Image (spheres, grey):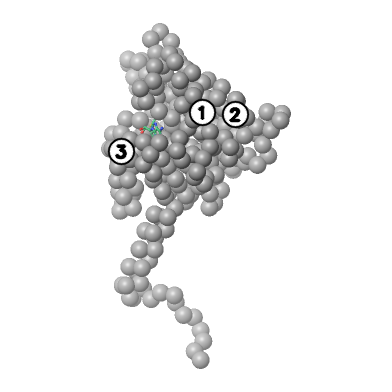
Amino acid sequence: MKTGHYPICDFGDLSCLFFIVVFLFLALEFCMSLILGDCRNFTGQLEYDYIFSSPPDFDEIGFDPNDRGQYQTFIKECFNGAFEKKVPITFALTDRKYKSGVISKSNLLMNVMRLYGYTLASHKIWAKAIDTEWMMRLTYSNVMTFAPANKKGNPVSSFKVNRDYKPFRPDVWSIARDAYKGYGYAIPVELVKRCLMAHLRSGQRVYDPFMGSGTTAVAAIQCGFDFVGTEIDETTFQLSQQRLKDLKTS
Ligand SMILES: C[S@@+](CC[C@H](N)C(=O)[O-])C[C@H]1O[C@@H](n2cnc3c(N)ncnc32)[C@H](O)[C@@H]1O
């Protein structure tokens, strides 16, 4: 009987390389699922450890910015399934300049989250590196992480933040805008990566209910985490699929 070291694969044989490529492709497909549909039908059904998402603005979903109750109801419906699972949730969102004031979507969300037993665990500001003379829009966004709360209103003990990950620590993040193929609602991959690295551990999965152009998926791939996402708009969904294909071939 022969003994000794037997390589699993001989790289001189190109068919072996083919199998490795196929394996990596399938592994990526398995770890990444993109779902076309309304998140309200999926949030309770899917398996995940953390949510990162930027919810749509009022006009993206045909809502009147003055009707705060309508938006709060929408958020409740979208995240109900996640509240039951008690996973941490990060929202990246821009408050809305409207007429002579600002409509604070961050406050709307805070109210909903409190109602469902969550507490604000961190609040970062994304300073968008842009210069604007005409201030019709705010040039900063909120990155708010909510943790399930215990009876005292503090984050439950299972809620952990990777405190060794330094990019998450400052309260103000100056990150240049970036967008895939000019998609107007995108947030930078770097911003999402900071949140994933702080809140996920190896082998865990992030869910983005409002996937848009797939920024959270890209960040998850680059950080080595699993991803699942839902997107209601077919054209935007196809954009996210294309983005992941481009990433595989880049
Ligand atoms: C602010 S964008 C997300 C952008 C994303 N973070 C990115 O970087 O590309 C919000 C997305 O939510 C989608 N959306 C709105 N309502 C939805 C719903 N009920 N279920 C799933 N997706 C929805 C919109 O079509 C839009 O693409």
Spatial separation of the CA atoms under disc 1 and disc 2: 9 Å
Label 1 CB-ligand 1 distance < 8 A: no
Q: Point out which mark residue 76 bears.
A: 1
Residue at screen point 53% across, 52% down: 203
Q: Compare marks 2 and 3 and give the one earlier in the sequence.
A: 2
Kind of residue at badge 1 = Lys
- Mark 3 surroundings within 10 Å by alpha-carbon count, few (fewer than 14), some (14 through 19), many (20 or more): few
Give the residue pinned by disc 3.
234
Q: Label 2 is placed on what type of residue? A: Tyr
* Dot 1 and dot 2 residues touching (CB under 8 Å): yes
Rendered image quadrant of residue 112: top right
Mark 2 lies on a secondary structure that is: loop
Does residue 83 appear in this view? yes
In the visual, does 235 lie left or right of 99? left
Residue 78 position, x and y percent, is 47, 32
Residue at image x 71%, y 30%? 151
Identified by mark 3, the residue type is: Glu
Q: Is residue 204 above or below residue 213?
A: below
**Please, what secondary structure does the residue beneath circle 1 have?**
helix
| Residue 88 appearing in the image | no
Mark 1 or mark 2: name the one nearer the start of the chain: 1
Q: Position of residue 227 (x, y in %)?
A: 45, 47
Q: Residues within 10 Å of mark 1 (few under 14, many from 20)?
A: some
Along the line of sight, the residue nearer the viewer: 86 or 7: 86
* Residue at the top extreme of this rendering: 100
The earlier-in-sequence mark between 3 and 1 is 1
Labelled disc at residue 116 = 2
User: For this rendering, which residue is in front, 37 or 227?
Assistant: 37
Look at 39% across and 63% down and name the residue there.
23
